[in-house]
Image (cartoon, grey):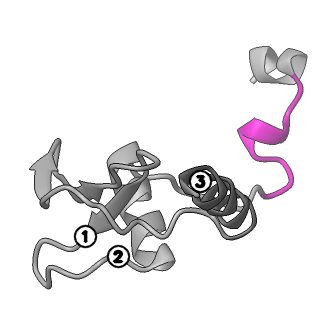
Amino acid sequence: MQFLADVLAKIVNFFFGCHHERLTRMFTLKQETYKVCLDCGSHIYYSLETLRPLSPRELRRMRAAHAGEVRVMLASPGSPSMLSSSENHAA
């Protein structure tokens, strides 16, 4: 009977993924607060201020902040980045 339960659990896990029922306590390492699922090893990130799981948007912001600031600037025609290498040396 246990064998059937294990097979059924694997099938459900395959289609629906881990439900993260068995989690570690919340802890903070390298300025990231999270719990770890003991079944699949996934990290569930939490806000240290609200003690609630981060939304996907908040998670992207956190990762961007840890990666460093990235600026996107529009290139104008004739800017140094648009010139060929021979034109850069002549300038």
Label located before the other in sequence (1 or 3): 3
Q: What x and y, as percent, mark residue 50?
A: 14, 85
Residue farthest toward the front in the current orientation of the protein: 1
- Find residue 42 and report its horizontal and vertical position in percent: 43, 51
Q: Quadrant of the C terminus?
A: top right
Residues drawn in magenta: 76-84
Label annotation for residue 46? 1
**Residue under circle 2?**
54
N-terminal-most mark, 3 or 2: 3
Q: Is residue 48 left or right of residue 67?
A: left
Alpha-carbon neighbours of circle 3 within 10 Å: few (<14), some, or many (≥20)? Answer: few
Query: Dot 1, crowdedness within 10 Å: few (<14), some or many (≥20)?
Result: many
Give the SS element for disc 3.
helix
- The image quarter in which residue 45 lies: bottom left
76 left or right of 65 in image: right
Marks 3 and 2, how far apart at CA: 31 Å
Q: Amino acid at mark 3?
A: Asp
Prevailing secondary structure class for the magenta stretch in the rendered image: loop
Label 3 sits on residue: 6
Magenta region includes residue 67: no
Q: Residue at x 76, y 55 (%)?
A: 75
What residue type is disc 1 on? Tyr
Which one is closest to the eye, mark 1 or mark 3?
A: 3
Secondary structure beneath label 2: loop
Residue 3 placement (x, y as % from top left):
61, 49
Label 1–label 2 contact, CB within 8 A:
yes
